[in-house]
Amino acid sequence: EIVHHIADREGLHILTGDGHTVSGIYFDGKQAGEYAGLIPVVGNTANITNLTVADSHIKANKGLAGAVAGAIADKCSKLVKFSAVTIDDSVKFEGDAKFGGMIGQVGYSVVKITDCISKTNGFFHSVTGEAKVYRSVSVGAYPFATTERVKAENVYTDTDANMSFEGVQVVPSDAMLGAGAASSMPGLNFPTSWKTTTSSYPVPTGAAASAE
């Protein structure tokens, strides 16, 4: 069960996946200026935790799209947090929109991404506010299309994209797999925040998200 809860009068939205997977997000937009994702626009402060998005197809033209959110709106009153979120490589994007694996665009707000893994299109396409990314993994793409207004710490990727950014370390794909991931990506805080798998990429435990 995925729980959505409005917690207080300030409009704090909590979306807790409890380790479950959302699949079957299909969007075939025809018009320009569209927003596409599980949540097209996050319009206020939100905590989105312990969730996987898989087996989805998003087609958008000249808009903003991400598996979880098309955009983070301007002037959210507090941090917008993503914790222990996984974007599977079975999520496909098509069209001329600005795509991010998790978020299309971060507006004039502050977003914090912790213990997340995106296996397609990195985490976000663009930022006009501020994005902080900690203890996270991007497979098959550099974590972000832009490094402006971004802070990163202990972020790992298998793609250099001719980019170098403080806090982001490039690791060969095979070193990210199986038990060896713990030694290749020590900043992920194994086994508390992340756990290794037998032969695939590590997965976030959700422990940090549950503690918040």
Image (tube, grey):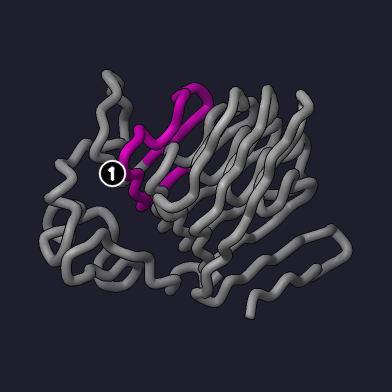
The extreme top residue here reads 162
Residue ID at (23%, 68%): 196
What's the residue at 54%, 48% (across, down)?
112
The magenta span reads: 133-152
Relative to 30, residue 2 above or below: below
Residue nearer the viewer, 1 or 195: 1
Whether residue 83 is visible: no
Residue at figure coordinates x 59%, y 54% from the top left: 81
Q: Residue furthest right?
A: 9
In the picture, measured across the screen, residue 166 lies left or right of residue 46, that is left
Q: Position of residue 117 (x, y in %)?
A: 39, 53
Asked whether residue 108 is in view, the answer is yes
**Which part of the image, by quadrant, shows the C terminus?**
bottom right
Location of the N terminus (image quadrant):
bottom right
SS type, badge 1: strand
Q: Residue at 46% of width from left, 53% of height from top?
A: 87
The amino acid type found where label 1 is placed reads: Tyr
Instruction: Give the residue number, with chain letter if any, for mark 1.
Output: 156
